[in-house]
Image (cartoon, grey):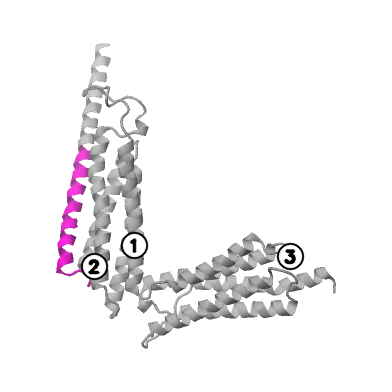
Amino acid sequence: MSADNSVGNVFVPLRNLLNSIQCVRDRVRDGESNESGGAFDLSNFWDTLNQAVKAVSQEATKLSVAFSKPPLPSQQDGEKLSEWILKSVLSLSTVYYWLPKSQGVSLRRQVRDATVDVLEGVTQLVEVILSSPLQSLSHEQLTSTGGVWSACDSLTQLPRDNKAALLVVLSAQIGVVKDAIEEIEQALSEVQDPFSDVLDDDQEPRGNQDTYWPEKDRLVIGPCQGLMKASAVCLRNLTSAVKTHGDVSTPQNVAQLDDLADITKELSPGVADLALCLYPPMDYSGVEDNVSKLGALLKKVLEIIRCSHVCGESQLTWVQFLDGAVDHNLQKTKDLLQHDSYILCVCVCVCVCVCFFLSEWL
C-alpha cells in the first residue's frame, strides 16, 4: 500500500467522526428533553454530566496528541480513537437529554448551550486535524484543543438549579444596562455645543449640530436616563430578592423564575435601543417610540415581580416606588417632546401665513 493511500485511510474514520459529531451537535441544539413523570435526581444528573464531559476532554486530548507528531496513527488506531471520542460525545448528549424542562427552562437552556459549545469545540478540533499539514502540531490545533478544554470547564461551572440560572441571566443584563448608562453619561460630559460660550441666549446655535446636543435635547435626555437607571435599579433589586426568596422546590416557583428570566432578558435591548436614538442628531420619533416601549416593558417586569414568590413586603416597597418613577419619567418625556412639537407646529403655521400674505401682496 502506498504512503498516500495509508494517509488517506487514516483520515477516513476522522471524516466519519466529524459527520457524526456534527449530527449530534445539531440534535442537541434543536432537540427536546425526555420528560419523565417520576422524581428527578438533580444531584445525580450533575455528577454524571461532569463525568461525561471529563471523558470528552480526555478523549479529545488523546486525539490531538495522536496527530501532533510522527508517526501518524494506523488506520486501526485511528478507528479506535474515533470510536472512543464518539462514544464520549454520545454519552454527553444522552446525559443532557436527561434534564427535564420541569427543572427550569432557563437552567436547561444554559446546559444546552454549554453542551453545544463542547460539541462545537470537538468539531473544530477534528476539522483542524483534517486540514493541518501532516505530522505537525499547528497553532490552530493547539488553539482548538484548548478550546475544547475551555468549553468543558465552562460546562462544569454552570449554575446548579433554576434559581442560580436566573441569577446568571440577571448578572448579564445588569452589565449591559450599566454599560449603556455609562456611555451616555460619558458622551454628555464630552459633547458640548462648540459655540455655547460665544452666543447670546437668543441666538441660534451654529456649527454641525449632528455632533453635539442642543440644550433642548439635553432636557429630553434627562427623563430617558431616568428610565434607563430605573431598569438598572430594578435588575439589582431583583437580584437581591431572588437571592433571598428564590425557591425551586415547587413547579410553580420554578416557572415563575423562568418568567422573570424571559422578561428581564428584554430590558438590555430596550435600554440599548433607547440610548442609541438619543445620540445627536436626536431622533425624536425614535425617542418617543423607545421610551414608550421601555416604559411599558419596565411596568410589565415590575408586575411579574409583584406577582412572584420573590416579592415580599420589603420588595413591594421598591416595586411600587419604581412603578411611580417609570410613570413620572414617561410623562416628563412626553411633555418635553410634545412641547417641542407644539413649537414646530406654530412655526409651520406662521410660515404658511407669511407665504400666503406674500403671495397676495405680490
Please say if 294 is above or below 132: above
Determine which quarter of the picture holds residue 86.
bottom right
Q: Quadrant of residue 359?
A: top left
Q: Which range is magenta? A: 309-338
Q: Identify the secondary structure beneath mark 1.
A: helix
Which comes before the other along the chain, label 2 or label 1? 1
Mark 2 lies on residue: 241
Q: Residue 212 vs residue 128: left or right?
A: left
- Residue 258 in sight here: yes
The answer to which of marks 1 and 3 sits earlier in the sequence is 3
Q: Residue at x 36, y 60 (%)?
A: 172
Helix, strand or loop at disc 3? Answer: loop
Q: CA distance from mark 1 to mark 3?
A: 45 Å
32 sits to left or right of 131? left
Picture quarter with the C terminus: top left
Q: Quadrant of the N terminus?
A: bottom right
Is the Cβ of the residue at disc 2 closer than 8 Å to that at disc 1? Answer: no
Point out the residue furthest to the bottom here. Answer: 38
Question: Which residue in the structure is indicated by mark 3?
Answer: 134
Mark 1: amino acid: Ser
Disc 1 target residue = 171
